[in-house]
Image: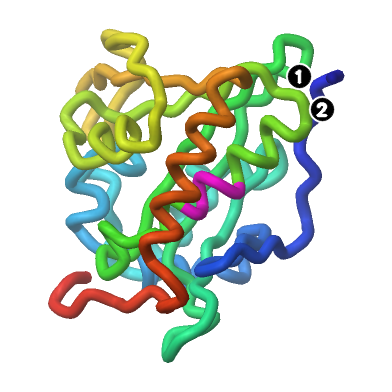
Amino acid sequence: MRCSRPPFGEVVEGRFISLEPLTRQLVPELFAAVGHPQVFDGGYGGGPAAYRDTLEGFTEFADTYYAWDAANVHAVRLLGGPHDGLLVGTSTLGDFEVSLGYAHLGWTAYDPRVWGTVVNAEAKLLILGSAFDNGFERVKIQADVLNTRSRAAIQKLGATFEGIARHDMRRADGAWRDSAIFSILSAEWPHVRRGLEKRLEKQGGRPVELAPGRG
């Protein structure tokens, strides 16, 4: 199958979430969801030094952090229940190398109130499915080596740990970051997909509930 960048621009609905293109107009909603210190403490956006506690500051951060025109940058919304339509996070498929069948799934952050729910599992199911359905061979997923929560979540997906890329990039405070590198190959996708689908089945028909006391 010839590799091509997955189509982008339409709303994609799953069982518990929907994906839509993240636009600059949605930045206030995204700030309400992920603009919390604990989201950045684990390394998101360059780490704690990247955190901005005002919409103005977060908008400046978002303007340069997200690859608005070069990647598939998604907004994640809840489907169903009392919080239907609430924007709860973002995730991106980018760094496309179509000739090599390579892409990078990352730049992912969620409202702390949906941590540990099926939101991430279904977002990964939809985005990875779009990559492999369009002929990609390898999708990389990575995290700051210090971000144990994200590393555990990536491992739980069924991604294969490849190793540590030392001094891979700079954190927002200027310090060097080491990155834990994982990947999923096209031949591994059916197994990974089944695992994600089983996680969604455990949710049954219940919509995602927001955990109190976070954010």
The residues tagged by marks 1 and 2 sit, at their Cα atoms, a distance apart of 6 Å
The disc, 1 or 2, on the residue closer to the chain's N-terminal end is: 2
User: Which one is in front, 186 or 170?
Assistant: 186
Task: Return the x and y of residue 100 as percentages of the image width and height.
Answer: 71, 10
Residue 65 point in image, percent of width and height: 48, 43
Q: Residues within 10 Å of mark 1 (few under 14, many from 20)?
A: some
Residue depicted at x 26% and y 32%: 151
In the image, 187 versus 181, the foreground residue is: 187
Please tell me in which quadrant of the rendered image residue 3 appears.
top right
Mark 2, residue position: 4
- Specify start and end residues of the magenta stretch as a single range: 122-126
In screen coordinates, is 132 left or right of 106? right
Residue type, numbered disc 1: Val
Report which residue position mark 1 lands on: 98
Q: Is residue 123 above or below residue 72?
A: below
How far from the left and from the top, in percent, is residue 210?
A: 29, 77
Q: Residue at coordinates 52% horizontally, 62% vertically from top-left?
A: 76
Res 7 label: none
**Residue at the spot x=66%, y=62% of the render?**
20
- Report if residue 35 is visible in the image: no
Name the element at disc 2: loop
Number of residue marks? 2
> What's the magenta bit mostly, secondary-structure-wise?
helix
Q: In the shown orientation, is residue 118 left or right of residue 3?
A: left
Is residue 126 visible in this depiction of the protein?
yes
Task: Tell me if residue 5 is in the magenta stretch.
Answer: no
Asked whether, in this view, residue 60 is left or right of residue 167, the answer is: right
Residue 2's x, y, as percent?
Answer: 86, 19
Closer to us: 38 or 207: 207
**Amino acid at the residue labelled 2:** Ser
Q: Is residue 125 magenta?
A: yes
